[in-house]
Amino acid sequence: MVMRIRKQPLGDRNIVGAKVEQSRKAIGMKQKDLLTQLQVRGIDLNASGLSKLEGQLRYVTDTELVALSDVLGVSIDWLVGKEK
């Protein structure tokens, strides 16, 4: 399996993107699988939007944050860096 390397440096539009990517990869989930699970929860996000979210290039809404926490099985506090 070959992992693609991020071409752009991380942005500063959110603090959860790197954690989303880290936890997604830790459970072996592909971006398309995460997108599917988010859509089941009513979050309409495309591949480009998720890529920008993980790259911290777009803002994250509160509803997205809750859904990401649920899908990835991590706490919101962990996603926002308040919990180790």
Image: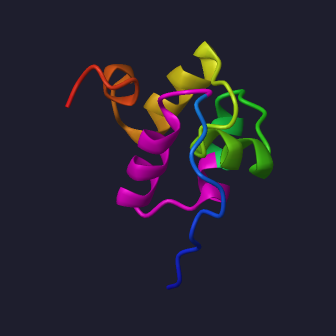
On screen, residue 23 versus residue 9, left or right, reads left
- Residue most extreme to the left: 84
- Residue most extreme to the top: 62
What's the residue at 65%, 56% (across, down)?
8
What's the residue at 71%, 29% (across, down)?
43
Between 79 and 30, the one lying in front of the other is: 79
Between 81 and 8, the one lying in front of the other is: 8
User: What x and y, as percent, mark residue 13?
Assistant: 62, 27
User: What x and y, as percent, mark residue 46?
Assistant: 80, 45
Q: Is residue 56 above or below residue 76?
A: below
Q: Main secondary structure of the magenta part?
A: helix
- Magenta residues? 13-34
On screen, residue 2 versus residue 69, left or right, reads right
Residue 45 inside the magenta-drawn segment: no
Q: Quadrant of the C terminus?
A: top left
Between 9 and 20, the one lying in front of the other is: 9
What's the residue at 78%, 49% (across, down)?
48
Between 68 and 13, the one lying in front of the other is: 13
What's the residue at 45%, 30% (across, down)?
70
On screen, residue 32 versus residue 47, left or right, reads left
Question: Residue 65's quadrant in the figure?
Answer: top right
